[in-house]
Image (spheres, grey):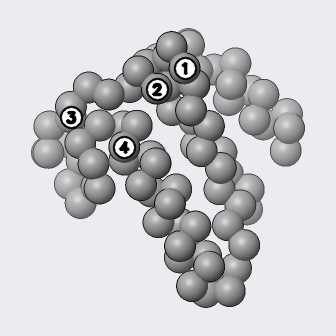
Amino acid sequence: VPLTVIVGLNDTAELPQALIPGQKGTNRYVIARNWVGDMATFAEENGLESRIELELIPGKGHSMGGLLPYGQEALEAR
C-alpha cells in the first residue's frame, strides 16, 4: 500500500516520553524519519518494495492547516 508520511521540518519540539513510548527519537521529525527508514529496511529484509515516502515540508511545524495542502497533493498523486 503506498503511503506518504508528511512532516514539517520545523516540527522539532521535544516530546515527553510518556507521549512517545518506544519511538526512535524525541520529536516528530526524527520519529517520522526513523520510522520510514525502519519500514524500508523491513520491506527489503522480506523481499518487498517499500512504498512509503517521507515528505519534509520546509517552514512548517505541527499544523494540520499548514500541512493539509501537502496531504491533499499526496492523495491526488496516488
Name the element at disc 4: helix
Name the element at disc 1: loop
* Mark with earlier residue (4, 3): 3
The amino acid on which the numbered mark 3 sits, given as a three-letter code, is Leu
Q: How far across and how far down the image is residue 75, in percent? A: 78, 37
**Separation (CA) of disc 1 from disc 4:** 14 Å
Residue at the image position 70 percent from the left and 79 percent from the top: 48
Name the element at disc 2: loop
**Separation (CA) of disc 4 from disc 3:** 11 Å
Please give left or right for residue 3 compared with residue 67 in the image. right
From the viewer's perspective, is residue 29 above or below residue 45?
Answer: above
Return the residue at label 3. Answer: 15
From the viewer's perspective, is residue 21 above or below residue 5?
Answer: below
Residue at the image position 54 percent from the left and 20 percent from the top: 58
The reply to whether discs 4 and 2 touch (Cβ–Cβ < 8 Å) is no
The amino acid on which the numbered mark 4 sits, given as a three-letter code, is Val
The reply to whether discs 1 and 3 touch (Cβ–Cβ < 8 Å) is no
**Label drawn at residue 9:** 2
The amino acid on which the numbered mark 2 sits, given as a three-letter code, is Leu
Q: Nearer the viewer, mark 4 or mark 3?
A: 4
* Mark with earlier residue (2, 1): 2
Residue at the image position 47 percent from the left and 66 percent from the top: 38
Return the residue at label 1. Answer: 58
**Separation (CA) of disc 4 from disc 2:** 10 Å
Please give left or right for residue 24 compared with residue 63 in the image. left
